Amino acid sequence: MTTQEVDYAKIDEVADDGVRLFKVMTRLEFALKDAGYASSGRRQAAEVEWDRYANEKLGSAFWRKIKGAANAETLIQTPPKRQVVDQSGSLDWEEAGIVSSVQELVGALRRVRNNLFHGGKGGDPDSDRNPKLYVASLYVIDQILKEDDIVRTIFTGDY
């Protein structure tokens, strides 16, 4: 077996806002679970109940406020594509329609995070838009934290 140096340069292609989004999303997920928006998911693992949070806590008033915000326009009008497995077992990308509800908004936010962390390291069809998606996602999270005192308190650790 030969010893060969590993080139880690590819990881530096993620924009600073992408790194920030990843960090912010991990903290947001913790805060949501701690605030009671968790259920037992696959293999009994705790998972965030995103749809319940979006519909019960944020609701239509939050959606009305966000849907008109220029800072969220990219996330709403042209949300990130979904990475899927096609019938032949190959990875592919599926278009996501315009966001039209708070639940879909939170879903688009999660998909930005998922694509950053899990998908599309090569061949990402949104690669040219990712910086805008990261900024829009960070804006929406900021608005969520301003809206929800409990989640914000847990997020910031200011108990």
Image (cartoon, rainbow, N blue to C red):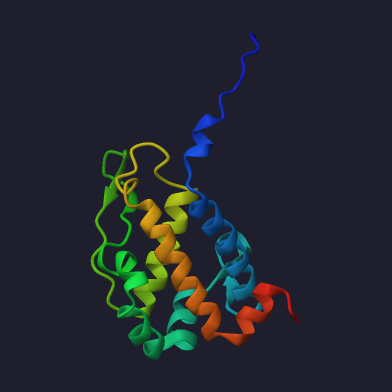
Q: Which residue lies furthest to the right in this view?
A: 159
Quadrant containing the N terminus in the rendered view: top right
Q: Which quadrant does the C terminus fall into?
A: bottom right
Q: Which of 155 and 17 is in front in this view?
A: 17
Horizontal side, residue 28 vs residue 88: left or right: right
The residue located at (30%, 69%) in the rendering is 73
Closest to the observer: 5 or 20? 20
Q: Position of residue 31 (x, y in %)?
A: 63, 73
148 is higher (above) or lower (below) than 34: below
Picture mark count: 0
Residue beneath the point at 47% across and 57% down: 113
Q: Is 158 placed left or right of 46 in the picture?
A: right
Q: In which quarter of the image is residue 82?
A: bottom left
Q: In this view, does 81 lie above or below 38?
A: above
**Measured from the top left, where is residue 66 in percent x and y?**
37, 80
The residue most toward the bottom is 61
Position of 21 with respect to 3 (left or right) is left
Q: Residue at x 54, y 82 (%)?
A: 146
Residue 46 percent location from the top left of the image? 62, 67
Which residue shows up at 47% across the image and 87% down it? 56
Instruction: Point out residue 114 in the picture as x, y percentages from the top left corner.
Output: 46, 55
* Image: 118 above or below 148: above
Quarter of the rendering containing residue 97:
bottom left
